[in-house]
Amino acid sequence: MEAMRRCQPKTIFTDEGQPVGDAVKMVMPEAKHQLGLWYVRRNASKYLPTYYVQPRFESLFNKCISDCHTEEEFESTWSSLLEQFDLHKNHWLNTLYKSRVRWAYIFNKESFCAGIRCSDNIKSIFQNLMGETITLQMFVQQYFKAAEQQRREELYEDFHCNESVPEMTLDYGLVEKHAAGIYTHTVFTAFQKELHKVLSVALREISSNGPVSIFQLTEVGLKKSTVEYNCVNSSIVCSCKKYESVGVLCAHTLKVLNARNVIHIPPQYILKRWTKSAKDGVVADLYGQEMADKRQQAVHLLMRKALNVITKGVSVNESQNIVDNCLDMALKRVEDGLGRRFDVNWMSAEGAEKGAVLSSPNGALSSFQMDFGIRSSGGGRCNKRDMEAIEAERASSRASDDEETD
């Protein structure tokens, strides 16, 4: 929570258990609490070891988890599972069924999870760090090494996304080119898979009312979905809810957009978190809200940009020298600019001492005065004591720097 500026996640995945559920409600009341599929499958193999290894059981169980398209289909599949293996009285299965809204995909289609419904990748990272004889100190050391490796890989991916273009598979695909230009390579690959599925989806318009049209789309295997499209504002909604869950338009919506000769992804369906510019833009405060203070926002934007440059620069000696030289150059130019502004304001202060009025009308403060907290002294005249205090502070600072140099 602290690392994410106390922003609550949209969805959190945990293991089964009342204590962890109560903790999530207390700490993250706005988050959608679901059970991680890795935990569900692990517990199935633990509590039903003789059944879970059977292909038919595994097939029905996995269908209940992620492949039912209606609640009726889920109920029918679950009943078949209990009937075929005579598990009506199994305590763990009955408990799992009561919490079905937390793990079955059909009940969570509209919950954003970024395509991550299990923690296999995270588990594999930690399992590689652990051993039978590892101590806590050794684990922490290995953890930091793994974190550093993850950062290096992220830096490489950032560079790779900005310096290379992913391979196009559709020569005439303007939507594909648009996606390649805005998405990271990983997200573009996921989008490209949906684009390829368009060729195997049949389209039929079933109704039209003004700007709104409704289509029925049929995939291989006779899976049907319904898409509603508004040609005025380019809003498009599919019954499969892939966009709501993953943040990438599905093959059904892409089929409809193609049929309506839309050659770009509508901007409202481009999640910034999936784009190459995800790290740029609006700065949020500790509570995830956009900063209203423009000066504070500018400071945070510059800090973020500088940190990004420094983080990338330290990875290679040559780039580290480039960053070092550029920072020195930037510092000198900033100090030169501040020095010129100070000289101008000092001259204005000297004039004010002789009775001259500063150029700021109606006693308004100059930007320099506001930067350094100088108060206006009635009638727009500069307060000499304020200027003397600033000059004394600068002299003291220079003296301290000289002592440190000596």
Image (cartoon, rainbow, N blue to C red):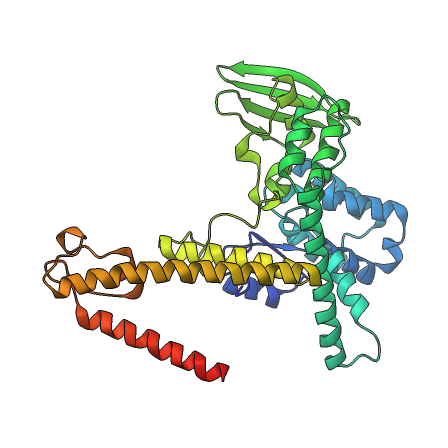
Decide if residue 28 is in sight here.
no
Please name whichever residue, 34 or 264, is drawn nearer the observer in this view of the structure. 264
Lateral position of residue 294 relative to residue 63, left or right: left
Residue 347 place in picture, x, y as percent: 23, 61
- Whole-percent x and y of residue 96? 70, 55
- What residue is rendered at 85% in x and 48% in y? 57
Q: Where's residue 317, x and y in %?
A: 70, 63
Q: Reply above or below: 94 against 271.
A: below
Residue lying at 62% horizontally and 17% vertically, measured from the top left: 261
* Res 24 seen here: yes
Q: Position of residue 236 (x, y in %)?
A: 56, 28
Position of 51 compared to 65: left or right? right
Quadrant of the image occupied by residue 195: top right
Q: 9 or 222, which lies in front?
A: 9
Count the marks: how many?
0
**In the depicted structure, whether residue 295 falls above or below residue 405:** above
In the picture, the quarter occupied by the N terminus is: bottom right
Image height of 206 relative to 175, above or below: above
In the image, residue 61 above or below residue 170 = below
x 51%, y 64%: residue: 27
Write down the quadrant of residue 321 in the picture. bottom right
Closer-to-camera residue (40/204): 204
